[in-house]
Amino acid sequence: MPRQPTIVGNAVLLVIDIQASAFMDVKEGIPMMPEYKDNMARALKVIEAAREAGLPTVYVQEIHRKDMVDYGRELDGSEGIHCREDHPGTRLPAEITGQRPEDYFVPKRRYSAFFGTDLEILLKGLKAQTLILIGGMTDVCVHYTFVDGHQHDYYCRVVSDSVGGTSPEAHQASLNAMEYLQEGAVIKTEDAIAKILSLSAAA
């Protein structure tokens, strides 16, 4: 197959788990690569471009009940308790991300934004063809959302320096894995912004 354009048809920005904890000095439950906060700050520029271009934006939030009944096997690996509904780092910081009432919101209990949510129904309603992913974690929620988007036949694009992983090595390995699935999937922030803004220019 020939390499596909960066954006095919209608695009939607998925803001994955950019929660208050990304901007807090005290972290809980999940390790973060040293550049994580810088990458989340860079992701805000992608959100601004999407807003300027009128691109539909979906804010995804991992959130768990405080009695912890919905963690499942999530705590069997390297992660500790995180994203509990009563923890201050779990909320979506609209004062930082610029989230608006007209933006879309999808809560999730698992890593993939598709698993057990209404994301697929929402994307069908938006007639989405290309998904642009920013946020965290590159090797966990971003990766699994990308894979499910790929398996639902969306064109998936991950903004490599606007996502952050649990470590630099895990971050890069997941970017490599996503690029393996769709050639041209991994793009830089400046390229993503240019492509998004070109949509409004072409409208």
Image (tube, rainbow, N blue to C red):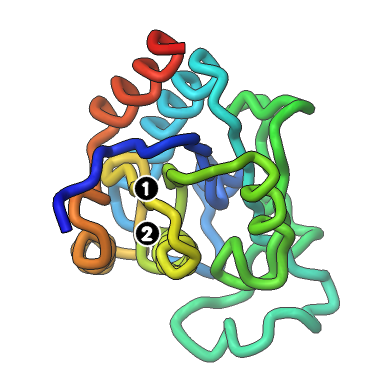
Mark 1 = which residue?
163
Identify the image quadrant of residue 118: bottom right
At label 1, which amino acid type do we have?
Answer: Val
Where is residue 79? Give x, y as percent: 50, 77
Where is residue 187? Give x, y as percent: 24, 41
At label 2, which amino acid type do we have?
Answer: Thr
The crowd level at tag 1 (other Cα within 10 Å; few <14, some 14-19, many 20+) is many
> In the rendering, which numbered label is found on residue 138?
2
At x 37%, y 59%, the residue is 138
At x 63%, y 71%, the residue is 115
Q: Assign the N terminus to one quadrant of the image.
A: bottom left
Where is residue 164? Give x, y as percent: 36, 52
The crowd level at tag 2 (other Cα within 10 Å; few <14, some 14-19, many 20+) is many
Residues tagged 2 and 1 counted as in contact (Cβ below 8 A): yes
In the rendered view, tell whether residue 34 sits above or below residue 115.
Answer: above
In the rendered view, tell whether residue 41 sits above or below residue 26.
Answer: above
